Image (cartoon, helix red, strand yellow):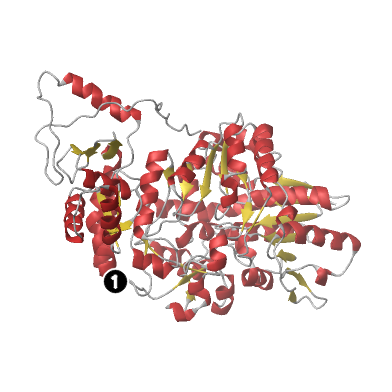
Amino acid sequence: MRVLLVNMPWSPIDLPSLALGILKRSVDERVPGATAEVLHANLEFTDWITARTEFTGDDYEYYALSSYFMGCGDWVFSSALYDDPHWREEEFTAVMRGKLKKSRMAMTRALHRVVPEYVDEIARRIVASAPDVVGFTSTFQQNTAALAAARRVKQLAPHLVTVMGGANCDGAQGAAVHRNFPFVDHVVRGEGEAAFPQLLTALTEGSDLAEVPGLCHRGSDGESVANPMATRPLPPAAILPPDYSGYFERLAASVARNWVEPKLVVEGARGCWWGEKHHCTFCGLNGSFMEFRSKSPDTFYNEIVELARRHRVLDMYVVDNILDMGYLTTVLPRIIDSEYDLRLHIEIKANMRRPQLRTLAEAGMIYVQPGIESLNHRVLDLMDKGVSGCQNVRMLRDGAETGLSVAWNYLHGFPGETERDYEPVIAQIPALEHLDPPVDLSARIAIERFSPYFERPELGFTGLRPEEHYRFTYDLPEEELYDLAYVFEAPARGIGEQTVTALNDALAAWKKHHADARLTHTDLGDRIVLVSRRRAFDWRTRQLTDPFELAVFRLLDQPHTVSALTRKATTKTPGAAPDEAGTQRLLDSWTALGLVFTDGGSYVHIAPAAVNEDLLRLDFMRHRYAAEAAPAEPIPAGHAPAEPVHAEPAPAEPAPTEPVHA
């Protein structure tokens, strides 16, 4: 049996498909007499479209990812799905006129008209290769492209068996795909590395398809039959490593090689250990199975090393929804000790401590996504995130100190939030401009299938409808769209537009000024030297020498309340007798200076420790101005210095190098 696995647009072009890599290995190793090949139709499309029109890597990224919640990528291929180059063009234009720039609108409509030709060509190539089974994966904005190709393949070769699977085919979505598109013979719902080989074996042997968990197939009367989903997720030992044969060779021959640097995709775990206990209210990830399970440290380490060795690629995207904390003491130390200079992206929880972050950085996990989402404790509680605003800011500070690039998003629109939850954050954002800003401006939450907001109307969202783009993409009744859709419309909740505008104005300024902003501290034992260059603060250098203030600042490495600070700092500085009111006055002065962030009655300092380059630069400036400036005196907290105060370079520790991004 010959199996052809197809990766249609808009799958990312800088990553091989993990799903198809695993399925290829599953077929090759678990189905006697069967072989699988992968057709990288997303890369084929880049060469096809650039030969016909002006099209760039940024354009591809827009349709693959950036426009996901507007559905532009899926609408582009709806013309091929319905064999109409003008399919619902008027509806699309009317809805999107106020959302898309004229140039993007023109390109989207132009792509919509020409892609049926591409789908016909790729379908003819598929048929010409004479497979027995054609499998299409569908995740994010791949659905209409995969459906359109399956439809055309079936028209050209009715005998070929067509199968779909992937994130867009989980649960009710997969059943809806099978019910409404008869040219799809089978839909695999849930984890496919077990079910897909079972399907192929059943097709070969003529055995009962009802035994394949989660499979959608057709009964003797042609009606869609959906088998019950598996009741348990795959154990980690059953999760195979991917086989990426052919991807890197095909990318090297594509125009896309000029757009991206390829990355490997690796998987250590599935599910979410936090979500098992506290499912974040807006999160629809993990679909049918939230249960966390991870590969053994030896297995995961060996997979990483083998993929890097085989493909000679050091950039890796770890797709785990959350880091297995056990890997901090097992897998990561082995990576640190290996000869591989890996550069990895991974999702983590925002309450990780600095030593843990340093381990990530030393292992090459220089790009982390901690799921920050907000800097206010009440809103974070509404999300059920299990962290506070101060902990999230601490994550940004410690990420900057350890050399990690922190990717995060700011979300709003949660039932129960108020303007009062945002006003203190907005006021403090200018103090944070030296830390990594969110990737984009704040976005109102989308209601995703499988999320608590979708499953539990009592949390604040009722009367959900599929997002509008589904209605001008598919020719289906509302009840079928409801089962097919992943993203849903919902009444606006939470803050109003005035507060959203104020928040986004502050975030836009953060993004604009981040590159030039700077705040660091250096602890020299008897004093702490602070250096600032931020547009909202007119001081440049400051030093703390008072023992009580030194103790308070050091304690603020972690979030503390005023009472806890007063108690602990007094213990550390015998003879000091400040009351809580005095501590509060100190914290108020530091807040005004942009040294601390406060949320929910707690405080945390926001100055990463200076690396040696900062200190050497200060030392150079000290010598330069030695003849001009008198020796500086310690400056009391809350008062701007008349002259810069310079610190001696710290001894011993070598300067860390900048992470190198491939």
Q: Is residue 437 left or right of residue 241?
A: left
Residue 208, quarter of picture? bottom right
| Residue at numbered disc 1 | 418
Q: Residue furthest right?
A: 205
| Image position, residue 90 (x, y; %) | 44, 66
Q: Residue at x 79, y 67 (%)?
A: 212
In this view of the protein, can residue 463 be seen by the observer?
no
Q: Residue at x 21, y 54 (%)?
A: 587
Q: Residue at x 77, y 51 (%)?
A: 26
| Image position, residue 620 (x, y; %) | 24, 21
Label 1: few (<14), some or many (≥20) within 10 Å? some
Q: Secondary structure at mark 1?
A: loop
Q: Is residue 607 left or right of residue 584?
A: right
| Image position, residue 349 (x, y; %) | 48, 55
| Closer-to-camera residue (46/277) | 277
| Image position, residue 191 (x, y; %) | 69, 61
Whether 511 is drawn above or below 424: the answer is above
Hey, what amino acid is under mark 1? Thr
Whether 445 is drawn above or below 632: the answer is below
| Closer-to-camera residue (367/575) | 575
Whether 531 is drawn above or below 234: the answer is above
Please count the marks in the image. Answer: 1
